[in-house]
Image (tube, rainbow, N blue to C red):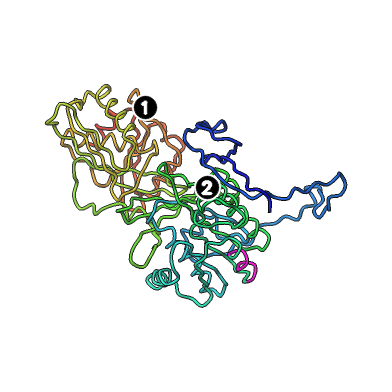
């Protein structure tokens, strides 16, 4: 065996160098250099014409096409995010914060396939088989067709997959898998890159769908080299407040479907439960009108969701007023406060302002600007808004209310839940079909919006 070779690799982008570096020349990040030891590989050199042409080039018109047959897991929100189900041979990377429910969701998914008589494999490299069985028993995922191994050796895992030929495999997690051919520790850039590439190639060759669970960094991205997201077909992120009950499964990349679809789940004792009607979940009981609240409609993926925005404006007892936002961008809230002060004359400079999106959902769509502004104005002026009114619109720096997209879908969702009035931009009135029983009131600026909602 040859001499061990030492190289230095960037943890962020995977670029390597023959010597240590403080700043990566590829991505420009500092302090991302790690040392790796690899075994030399035998170089194979061939002259031109000696390669075996197993797959010669062919015209694209002669390539056999057709729609891929998808396998449904019976978890509608999960299948929706994937684009309609699992494609045989696909490779998916699932990321999220620790304890958010990644392992639980994928264990439920492969269990549903096992209940349909399909052989599945769950590779647990972080937990013992007993611990995984306890979770499976709690969420009702016990099946004779669901196989479980606790292994972190890449060669052994690939051997089990080739021998069993399962329909789907879950690897929990890819950062704990190691290849004996590499000298570096599990979780290093080389190990993560080698393990992922080998598992993805094996899945393509055997038709087995591979699901890789990945840890995330402090910035919320999957730990490891960026090439990890490039070699897989689908990248899913499970988001949500750790102390909240609701989770959102979002697709950041999907070669077999749209990235505009999301899945909404509720974490409970039985595992991840689908949320069929998110608007009813995120909306509290509307028994009485309350000041400082506004109902807005946001688009998550392709589905409209009605949520309640709560604002509390009170006189500050300190020299510097507080600005606290939960579930909403604090910088965007500061812009809306400045607009209300400059364009509407509301003296908010000496007020403590607290903003909260009910239900633990995070919204960042510009279409909720008008609702946030009306909630703050309602609390400051101690004026109540009607509980049957939905506020939709983007607010510009001049105080004007701008039109938003998909206004008809938003109104249809509001009417379905019993709302009778919708306040939106005046430019949204032209050519818009208004549902029966719902009145659409167009406003031009935030002053006009206050006159309508507080009348």
State the quadrant of the C terminus: top left
Left or right: 2 as drawn, with respect to 384: right
The verdict on residue 433 being magenta is no
Tag in front: 2 or 1? 2
Q: Quadrant of the N terminus?
A: bottom right
Q: Secondary structure at mark 2?
A: loop
Q: Answer above or below: position of 136 versus 125.
A: below
Above-or-below relation of 410 to 373: below
Q: x and y percent of residue 128 in the render?
A: 44, 68
- Picture residue at 26% right of the left edge, 21% below the top: 342
Please state which of residues 364 and 414 is positioned toward the viewer in this rendering.
Answer: 364
Residue assigned mark 1:
396
Residue drawn 55% across the image and 56% down it: 178
* Disc 2 crowd, CA 10 A, few/some/many (<14, 14-19, 20+): many
Magenta segment? 157-163
Please indicate whether residue 361 sits to the left or right of residue 209 in the image: left
Q: Residue at x 60, y 58 (%)?
A: 199
Q: Is residue 455 visible?
A: no
């Amino acid at each position: 065996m040859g001499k061990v070779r030492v190289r230095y690799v960037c943890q962020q982008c995977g670029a390597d160098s023959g010597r240590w570096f403080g700043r990566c020349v590829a991505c420009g990040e500092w302090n991302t250099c790690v040392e790796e030891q690899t075994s030399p590989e035998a170089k194979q050199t061939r002259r031109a014409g000696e390669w075996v042409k197993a797959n010669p080039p062919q015209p694209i018109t002669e390539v056999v096409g057709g729609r891929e047959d998808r396998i449904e897991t019976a978890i509608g929100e999960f299948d929706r995010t994937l684009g309609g189900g699992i494609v045989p041979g696909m490779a998916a990377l699932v990321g999220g914060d620790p304890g958010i429910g990644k392992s639980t969701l994928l264990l439920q998914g492969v269990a549903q396939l096992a209940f349909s008589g399909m052989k599945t494999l769950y590779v647990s490299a972080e937990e013992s088989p007993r611990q995984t069985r306890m979770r499976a028993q709690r969420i009702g995922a016990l099946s004779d067709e669901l196989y479980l191994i606790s292994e972190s050796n890449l060669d052994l895992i690939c051997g089990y997959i080739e021998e069993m030929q399962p329909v789907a495999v879950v690897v929990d997690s890819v950062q704990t898998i190691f290849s004996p051919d590499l000298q570096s520790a599990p979780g290093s850039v080389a190990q993560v890159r080698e393990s992922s590439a080998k598992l993805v190639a094996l899945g393509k060759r055997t038709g087995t769908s591979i699901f890789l669970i990945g840890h995330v960094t402090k910035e919320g991205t999957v730990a490891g080299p960026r090439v990890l997201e490039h070699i897989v077909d689908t990248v899913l992120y499970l988001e949500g407040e750790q102390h909240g009950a609701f989770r959102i499964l979002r697709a950041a990349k999907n070669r077999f479907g749209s990235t505009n679809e999301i899945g909404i789940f509720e974490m409970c004792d039985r595992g991840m439960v689908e949320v069929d009607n998110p608007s009813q979940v995120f909306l509290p009981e509307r028994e009485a009108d309350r000041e400082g609240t506004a109902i807005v409609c946001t688009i998550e993926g392709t589905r409209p969701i009605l949520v309640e925005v709560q604002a509390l404006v009170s006189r500050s007892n300190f020299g510097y007023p507080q600005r606290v936002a939960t579930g909403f961008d604090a910088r965007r809230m500061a812009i809306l406060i400045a607009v209300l002060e400059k364009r509407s004359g509301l003296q908010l400079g000496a007020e403590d302002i607290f903003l909260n999106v009910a239900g633990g959902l995070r919204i960042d769509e510009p279409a909720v600007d008008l609702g946030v502004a009306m909630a703050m104005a309602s609390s400051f002026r101690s004026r109540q808004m009607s509980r049957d009114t939905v506020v939709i619109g983007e607010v510009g720096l001049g105080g004007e209310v701008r039109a938003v997209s998909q206004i008809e879908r938003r109104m249809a969702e509001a009417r379905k839940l019993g709302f009778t009035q919708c306040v939106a931009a005046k430019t949204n009135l032209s050519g818009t079909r208004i549902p029966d029983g719902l009145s659409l009131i167009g406003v031009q600026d935030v002053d006009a919006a206050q006159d309508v909602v507080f009348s």
